[in-house]
Amino acid sequence: MPQGTKLNRTSLSQQIREALLERIVSGVLKPGDRLVELKIAEEMQTSQAPVREALRELEAIGLIESQRNRGTRVRTLDETELAEIYMVRAELEALAGDIVANGDPELPIKLEKIVERMKKAADKGDIKKFVILNSEFHGTIIQATGNNTLVRVWEGLDVSSRTWVNMSLTAADLHDFVDSHSEIAHAIAKGDAAEARELSWRHVRESIPNRAD
């Protein structure tokens, strides 16, 4: 975000979080760099309250850390921690694929439309847009389960931010991701619960950093 850009009043903390997240994953902000609440608020022309909230959210997902007498700094990305989160996510999404395969007939149509938008983002090399659509795809499946506990746990993993972080660590072809999403959508469209479960599980597991399986 250009210095001095004034943010809209809606979802200020979310906008600040996204701006800082982009700087972290792009390497503009490096491990050890300090994040000064007042300085960020002045740059983005807002009060310190939404900045404080944004920093809390980034700390919750492990991208920054606050230490007494050292302030708030960018953390070194922990691939082991990220891998553990992906392992949990794989099980959740496998369950979701199983549940929705014989559900709403409109769901596959919604998913295919998202896949088409993902393909366009991949063609343009627009990683940020792709990550947003990736989360929309998986979130649509999770919501379609109607299982509130599953939804709550999955949302707690903050898939969008962690996908962005993971992609900054790999050189994967976005079109490969498009294909795997399309396969999941087709399995759900066929009503094949076993295949939807397996493909959903494999899709996430194959994205684990430095996976051994």
Image (cartoon, rainbow, N blue to C red):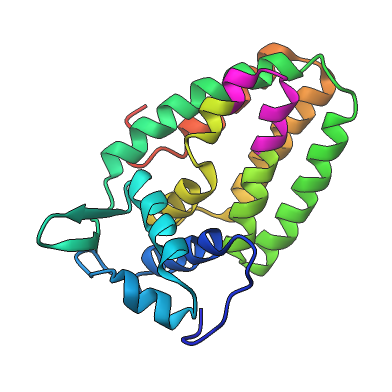
Q: Residue at x 49, y 34 (%)?
A: 156
Residue 123 falls in which quadrant of the image? bottom right
Is 207 rendered above or below residue 168?
above
Q: Secondary structure of the magenta portion, mostly?
A: helix
Q: Position of residue 63 (x, y in %)?
A: 33, 53
In this view, the residue in front, 42 or 199, is: 42
Q: Residue at x 63, y 69 (%)?
A: 9
Q: Position of residue 177 (x, y in %)?
A: 61, 46
Direction bottom: furthest residue:
4
Is 207 rendered above or below residue 166?
above
- Asked whether 171 falls inside the magenta stretch, the response is no
Q: Position of residue 66 (x, y in %)?
A: 22, 54
Image position of 71 (left or right of 164):
left
Q: Quadrant of the C terminus?
A: top left
Is 34 rendered above or below residue 55?
below
The residue stretch that appears in magenta: 138-151
Q: Position of residue 126 (x, y in %)?
A: 62, 66
Camera sees residue 201: no
Q: Residue at x 49, y 29 (%)?
A: 89
> Total marks drawn?
0
Camera sees residue 148: yes
- Asked whether 142 falls inside the magenta stretch, the response is yes
Image position of 48 (left or right of 73):
right
